[in-house]
Amino acid sequence: MSLFISDAAAQAAGGAGSPGFMSFLPMIALFVIFYFLLIRPQQKRQKEHRNMVAGLAKGDEIVTMGGVLGKITDVDDNFISVEIAKGTEIRVQKMSVQAMMPKGTVK
């Protein structure tokens, strides 16, 4: 029995002497992979969405996050008025605009 204990103690002592940088290398590599595959593309999409929302103007045709298609009739600081049918307007937050459509989409 003492033979097994001394072997285990010898293995633990040999491994404990060299922790260093190599033990953190897999975590660092994982973070780099997450950054380039998840974090960076999400930040790029957020920046593009902010720029699109900042550039909204009267007459633009949009789709909201709820799937409503319409034409902008009025722009305020935080809200826009969207005509979704003749004589039917709704007010939505600017940030709820998902995409701008090409001119002529709404008829």
Image: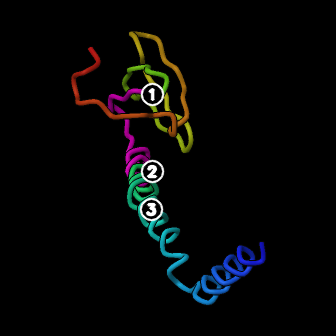
Image position, residue 80 (x, y; %) = 50, 33
Label 3: which residue?
35
Q: Are marks 2 and 3 in contact (CB under 8 Å)?
A: no
User: Residue placed farthest to the right in the image?
Assistant: 2
Badge 2 element: helix
**Mark 3: amino acid:** Tyr
Q: Which mark is residue 64?
A: 1
Identify which residue, 105 or 9, lies in the foreground.
9
Mark 3: few/some/many CA within 10 Å (<14, 14-19, 20+): few
- Mark 1: give few (<14), some (14-19) or many (20+) Cα within 10 Å: some
| Residue 51 inside the magenta-drawn segment | yes
The Cα atoms of the two marked residues, 2 and 1, are separated by: 16 Å
The residue lying furthest to the bottom in this view is 17
Tag 1: amino acid: Thr
Residue located at (40% from left, 29% from top): 72
User: Can you tell which of label 2 and label 1 is closer to the viewer?
Assistant: 2
Q: Which region of the structure is painted magenta?
A: 46-64
Upstream in the sequence, badge 1 or badge 3?
A: 3
Residue receiving disc 2: 46
